Amino acid sequence: MKSEPDVFSFDQLRKRRKEPWSGVRNYQARNFMRDGMSVGDPVLFYHSSCAEPGVQGLGKVASKAYPDPTQFERGGEYFEPKATREKPVWWLVDIAWAADFARPVTLEMLRKDKRLADLLILRPGNRLSITPVTAAELRTIAGLGG
């Protein structure tokens, strides 16, 4: 899961312990959360759009998917006029802090590691804030993070 540190950082997640991952407005990313995540699944927390992008640490999925309440907030940044309480458009999961890495796993480190050649976040043009990783990719990245 990717976030800009000036919007929501891994440090903030650690302090709050748990946070709803709201405001996702991409159908594919929504589907990854709604259909592909289960309570307890590990999450790699990635900082983007910063001096040194990279994975900061581990979180975990802390809830089943549920409707993103920001879609119902008229005048809000994430308001969705097509959404109703009966037929929500946007979904989220809660993410909880799990563990710090000894060191961030930088984008450069990800690109250099041959075991991560198929990592979705490294594909040209990928702009998704949420992408799945394989168990092997997770182990590799966690190992690089110490």
Image: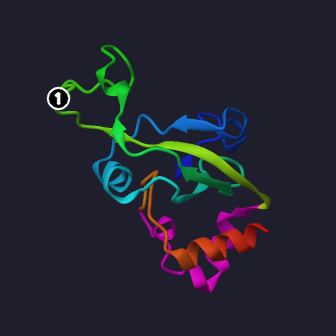
Residue pictured at 67% horizontal, 33% vertical: 16
In the rendered image, which residue does mark 1 sit on?
86
Crowding at dot 1, Cα within 10 Å, few <14 / some 14-19 / many 20+, comes out as few
Q: Secondary structure at mark 1?
A: loop
Residue at 20 percent across and 24 percent down: it is 81
Q: Quadrant of residue 70?
A: top left
Does residue 78 show up magenta in the picture? no
> Could you say which is closer to the camera, residue 122 or residue 17?
17
In the rendered view, would you say 39 is above or below 93? below
Residue at x 28% of width, y 49% of height: 27
Residue 129 placement (x, y as % from top left): 46, 51
Q: Quadrant of residue 18?
A: top right
Q: Residue at x 44, y 64 (%)?
A: 132
Judge left or right: residue 30 versus residue 9.
left
- Tell me where the magenta segment starts and ends, as one range: 104-125
Say what amino acid the circle numbered 1 marks: Glu
Above or below: residue 132 compared with residue 38: below
* Residue 7 in the image, given as x and y percentages of width and height: 59, 34
In the image, taking residue 123 as reference, residue 75 lies left or right, namely left
**Percent position (x, y) of residue 31?**
30, 53
Residue 119: % across, % down: 50, 73
Colouring used for the render: rainbow
Q: Residue furthest top?
A: 75
Q: Nearer the viewer, residue 95 or 145?
A: 95
The front one of 41 and 117 is 41
Residue 109 located within the stretch drawn in magenta: yes
Left or right? Give the position of 12 relative to 95.
right
Specify the quadrant that holds the C terminus: bottom right
- Extreme residue in the bottom direction: 114
